Image: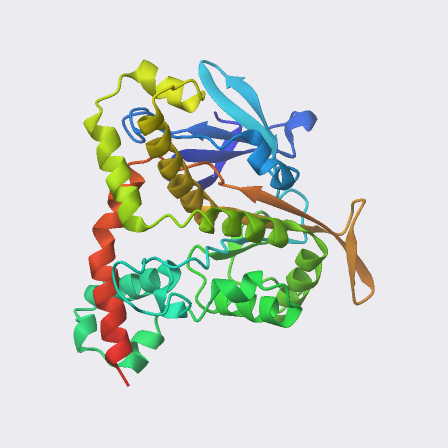
Amino acid sequence: MDQYTVLGEGAQHIVYQYIGNDPTLKDKVIRIRKPRDICEISSNLILPFNNTDWTPLKKYFAKKQPYQIGDQQCQIMDNLFFNVVFAVEIKPKTFLPILSNKQENKDLCDPKNQRFFMIQLLKAQKKLQKNGKDIYQCTKMEIDSLISKYDPRKFYNGKIENLFDAIIDLADIPENNFRLFNNQQKHVQNIEEFNIEEIASIISETLLLEDLIQQLKGFFHMLQQMNLTVEETQEAYEKLKQKKLTNKQFQDIVEGKCQDPEIQKIAFKLLTFSSFQALSDLSIIGSFRKEGSGKFVEVGNQKLFYQYSIVDCDLKPLNKIEDYMSTIDELIKLRNYYDSLK
């Protein structure tokens, strides 16, 4: 592994950049799953969507191929940051509400009912705690300085001015939802050649020329029409655990061979939830290069060839439901306190 350096790391995988002398690998990265003791997901059942459901989006998926380094099984894929002027990683998140009508009568279209907004409050709470402050004793102005104004619905509504505003809002408090990379493949706060307004304009113009946002939005709406509530998801998960299924029975569910109608119904609900989570957590990578072929945008006197890809769209293990449910009460409490402030 002395010919590779760490490019990025997530909860389940580490991505390495090739830095050796083999010209056939200079624009490649490898993706390795962390050891089981670090990332234990085998017993938590991941239900894959049928490939046809992903078909409209598959052209944007970063292509992966099996690869072997010594006795290590991994995947090799194109380095999306290779030879770029700049690249951007955006986590657009979902615009779906966290709550159901069963829990309260709050307007489900209210942006403060979005999980993204509530998670921002939770992160603000942790930042304040590090400084010895209690968020429940803070003013609205103190809290607002720590949270993003980003609203996912602006990103998805198809209007260039709203998409531009959404990108600016993400960049204002970027955290891991908006990241810029320079021509050295380094994560940076800004790009020397372009200010953030120029970058937001380039992304807005080029991204709307693709059908990527429309396809994601369509998938969200398809899932939303299933009317799955948080409570139903938790109930389905508890029922599945009570079944004490064997690994073979789990495999039958994944392969669509399960004939038990009750388990099929449970699995469908959990699949829908897992898909919501995957769509909420995926990243859109935009790569902009001075050299290339295909689509380009003219900026000043130069052409920027661009490409958009989707990464991190793996379905999440079902034990994520427990994490999701464990934070809901605190999220609602934080949101209600924020609503009470003037």
Task: Tell me the quarter of the image containing the C terminus.
Answer: bottom left
Report x, y in % for residue 76.
57, 27
Q: Quadrant of residue 304?
A: bottom right
Above or below, 168 relative to 20: below
Above or below, 193 relative to 78: below
Report x, y in % for residue 294.
80, 46
Q: Nearer the viewer, residue 96 or 303?
A: 96
Above or below, 341 relative to 62: below
Q: Residue at x 39, y 18 (%)?
A: 252
Report x, y in % for residue 296.
78, 54
Q: Residue furthest bottom?
A: 342
Q: Residue at x 28, y 77 (%)?
A: 339
Q: Quadrant of residue 113?
A: bottom left
Taking 74 as reference, is 136 left or right? left
Q: Residue at x 17, y 77 (%)?
A: 137
Taking 73 as reference, is 250 left or right? left
Q: Nearer the viewer, residue 118 or 137?
A: 118
Is residue 196 visible to us here?
no
Taking 248 as reference, is 136 left or right? left
Q: Quadrant of residue 238?
A: top left
Q: Nearer the viewer, residue 110 or 75?
A: 110
Q: How many marks?
A: 0
Is residue 123 visible to us here?
yes
Above or below, 209 relative to 241: below
| Scheme by which the image is coloured | rainbow
Report x, y in % for residue 131.
21, 68
Q: Residue at x 64, y 28 (%)?
A: 25
